[in-house]
Image: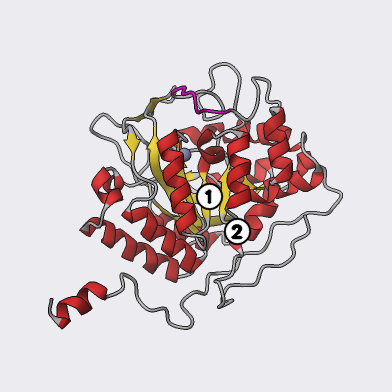
Amino acid sequence: MTGLAAATMAAPLFHALPAAAQQRRTIGPVHTPATTANRDLPLVDFHTHLQRRTTAEDLISKMDATGVARLVLMPLYYGDGGGSVNDGQGSDEQARDYGARYPERFAPFVGMQRGELNGREVMREQTPQGIRLLRETEAKLRTGDFFGMGEFMLRFYPYTNKFGIVATSDMDYPADGWLMRQFADLSARYKAPMCFHAEAEPHVADAVRRLVEKHPEAILVWAHNCGRSSATDIAAMFQRYPNLYADLGGMVYSGPNVEAYGVYWPRRTQWMHLVVDERGTLLPDMKALFERYSNRFVIGTDIAHARVYERYLGHIPRWRHILSQLSPAAARNLAFGTANRLFRLSTAGLQRFAPIESVPI
Ligand SMILES: [Zn+2]
């Protein structure tokens, strides 16, 4: 091997960071007086998606009507065609624009629901399209306009819903493949939470554990209550991995005719564990988990497709019903406290982001 070849191979994938590169735009903590009842808390909706025809003004009006202070926007790039109906076509530029216009209300993420990530090869090994997406993502994180990355789709069951949405891909990509490990490095470097969807079948959960373990500086948010894991398994992982978080995206919707992750939908497996019963009451083991580890949980409505936003107003009361079943401290963490801390993490050792304040919760 020539010296030049060795130097080329050893060249870092990412640029050296100039001193001012990691300045994320500041965002104030959501807060409320200590006397606010659980049911009335301001909410940070940490798991939502952005589609082309969803307007910022419509989102703001829905948030104002329901007491949602802040929304994470994860652009859904998927379009229609080839049997799929996604009502998506969102983009990072759109999310950044919404964040610029309403800086305290929207927290844009770099979107990862992209057709180019549908394939084992790109997730498992080094490919030109993987490298390109990593570089583009880093450039976006460096602007300071983005607060995270996601939703990465790893183990996903296809579905058709009553809105006519058809998600066709039955995905099973390695959580600890080359690409996710590179993104975990980016997460660590920019203290950018990365949200991923991975139904916790045994081989999937094993791969997630390897990813978390190999990247202790990354901020990993395992969507849908750690892929609908059991309370016992989640507690064991939280105990072992301080950098692991869970979002509860869609997990509290229950009852007849529900199409969401709060029920055994769109498929039932023996590894699937619910959070609420059919009346929306927390199951005892999950309630104990949320009380014990409330500083690891965020909530989310998980509106994935533009036409489904019409459900938004009806979803929020379910979340408020959940909060009313918790202690004030746990309710505040789920409603906004954990999200506050995730948005205000500092780069390890550099402290270029606003330092974490002790937000009263
Ligand atoms: Zn998801």
Instruction: Locate residue 327, reporting x and y percent.
Output: 80, 41
Quadrant (top left/top right/bottom left/bottom right) for the N terminus: bottom left
**Residue annotated with mark 2:** 342
SS class of the residue under badge 2? Answer: helix
Report which quarter residue 92 is drawn in. bottom left
Is 216 covered by the magenta stretch? no
Q: Over which residues does the magenta segment extend?
A: 267-273
Q: Is residue 326 above or below residue 354?
A: above
SS class of the residue under badge 1? Answer: strand
Q: Answer yes or no: disc 2 within 8 Å of ligand 1.
A: no
Q: In this view, does 45 lie to the left or right of 15?
A: right
- In the drawing, what numbered circle is on residue 240? none
**Which is in the foreground here, disc 1 or disc 2?**
1
- In the drawing, what numbered circle is on residue 221? 1
Instruction: Locate residue 227, reporting x and y percent.
Output: 50, 37
Identity, as a three-letter code, of the amino acid under mark 1 = Val
Is residue 54 something that shows in the picture? no
Q: In this view, does 240 lie above or below 231?
A: below
